[in-house]
Amino acid sequence: MSLVTRNALIALGITVILAGTVALTIDYLNRARISELSNIENQISIDTLSLDTQFSLLEAAPCDSAASSTELTGELTDLGNRLSYAEDQLGTNNAQVTQLKQQYSLLEIRDYLITKQLSAACGTRPVTVLYFYSNAGDCSDCDKAGYALSYLRNTYPALRVYSFDYNLDLGALKTFITISKVKDSLPAFVINGKTSYGFTSLGVLEKQFPKGALSTTTPQS
Amino acid sequence: MFAYPFLFIAIFFESFVLVTLLSKPARDARGRAPVNINDISTLPSVAVIVPCWNEAATVAATCDSLLALDYPKEKLEVILVNDGSTDSTREAMSRFEGNPQVRIIHKENGGKHTALNAGIAITDAEFIGCLDADSFVEPNALREIIPCFADPQVGAVTAAMSVHQPKNLLQHMQNADYIFGITLRHAIASINGLYVTPGPFSFYRRTVIDKLGGFRYGHQTEDMEMALRIQRAGYGIENAPRARVYTKAPSTLTKLVKQRTRWTTGFIRNVLGEYRGLVGNRQYGALGVLMLPTALIAIASGIGLFFLMIFELARQTLSALQIRAGIPLSYSLLPHGSFSMFYFPASFYVLLGVVTILASFSLITIGKRVSKTPGSLALGLVSYTLLYGFVVPLWLLRATADVTLGKHRGWK
């Protein structure tokens, strides 16, 4: 075997090893991402249960615990951002991502229900947005709608936005969609119980909100 | 996905160079001692030709550096060839009139190859060197070159080039590129795969030039044409990694693109023209099966990756603009989200790119160590990383367009 051939074979081996190492590194980082997501999700799950339990314990005076709900929404937002990034990196068909999305959706529904209960008990009027999207390639305006909602959430911290993948295979979500009477014309928004479809511009979306809802403080009745 | 094969080839080639550097022929080359100049009678006679066309600013310093070479005066002659310069090159050369080591030729402009041939015609030296008039040599450079001719089958020897006093970022980038070239030339010479004997301080065996004929136009790359001719004739091209020579590098992007366009068009026209038979031909060993095909692929991949980058950039910019349309600039222009390792963009493409860059850094550092080139490389590595990938496509595209359209440009 000539020196050139020998060196070429060794170089090929090194290249394969390097490419393999890169692939393993990416796999490791993605696993670390999933693990981090799971940790966050577990923490939120505990927080939600705690809030739920707290709410049950303080039924006589539930409004005392209202502040903690807003804090949880911030954590949910962070988890949603990370989950969205992980979905971009790992693909929409990744089993772990799908499972995390299901858990995340359940947490969102739970938080939404608690918020509604608190609202009824305490007489508050939080502005809630249920946002239904699809990333199956059948919703050309979903990216724009998602970005506009991120802007609104960032500008108005009291706004409570819950995002749901309309096509996610989760019984509770399907029931939630049925109860909310949301059709598969996406993007869809349920703003304080009022449903609307499609996204054209931020201005049009803002008009869907109740008067005075978009302010930097939580509106009170 | 389009970029993966090219990144894979780049890593393979860099690995190949590293492995070849560790192989015995390269180790032996590094262990080669400089020629002993005490026994004058055994030393070969050497002539260095300096072709000049409007080089008034640097030719005197170039000639001074040659006269300072650590080599017996009676064995070394310098031939300055004024190739019809229109500036004060004639006056600059006149300083050396009367120096017994220097011969001066003034001729009508005919191109670099004619200047070199004019110099060859008046000397009987056993080894003939060339030095561009904007380059300067280290005193020990010739002593490093001569032992490389020990094998009678060696037809030419190349030196170790770096940039003379780089000042701006573009010149530092070229310095890193040149030092990368030192490693590459040293490794590839050990398997006889060189296809260019650069203008700065390459040497030729007189008998080989007599046999193959003098320099030709060679599509403005007479050094490449001569190297390919030497290889086709079955001779070897060696490298002396410690024979340091410093050359002036273009200071502006326009000049750099013009210079590299000339090199690239010369390569394409020579290799796909008269020397097409060498490409992929096992008879020519590493040159035929590895170096020439890899160089052609490098040109294609450079252009391909450039268009891919432009396409991706345009696509993502358009998408970002569409998504941000109607959102206040105070929000849309600022980055959002936390700076966490979680968001580290560890894609296969990015990490392979990082591996390629790190391997390049290793090869550049090795080149500096092997050649003992002085100076810091910090700015060179920074500018090489930040600029090189963006400027290379400029001359690759221009050269490919010129070859395709049959366009010929001037020298300077």
Image (cartoon, coloured by chain):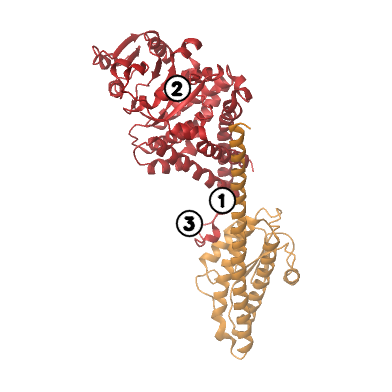
Chain colours: A orange, B red
- Quadrant of residue A62 within the rendered picture: bottom right
| For marks 3 and 2 on the same chain, the one whose residue lies earlier in the sequence | 2
Q: Separation of disc 3 and disc 2 at Cα?
A: 65 Å
- Nearer to the camera, B317 or B290: B290
Looking at this view, name the residue that lies furthest to the bottom: A60
Q: Which residue is mark 1?
A: B320
- Quadrant of residue B193 within the rendered picture: top right
In the picture shown, does residue B393 fall above or below B213? below
Residue A57: x and y in percent read 62, 89
Q: In front: mark 3 or mark 2?
A: 2
In the picture shown, does residue B149 fall above or below A93? above
User: Do the dots labelled 1 and 2 sit on one chain?
Assistant: yes
Chain under disc 2: B
Chain under disc 1: B
Secondary element at tag 1: helix
| Label number found at residue B150 | 2
Residue B76 in view in this figure: no
Residue B72 in view in this figure: yes
Residue B385: x and y in percent read 46, 42
How crowded is the residue under tag 3: few (<14 C-alpha within 10 Å), some, or many (20+)? Answer: few
Chain under disc 3: B
Q: Which residue is mark 3?
A: B334
Q: Separation of disc 3 and disc 1 at Cα?
A: 13 Å
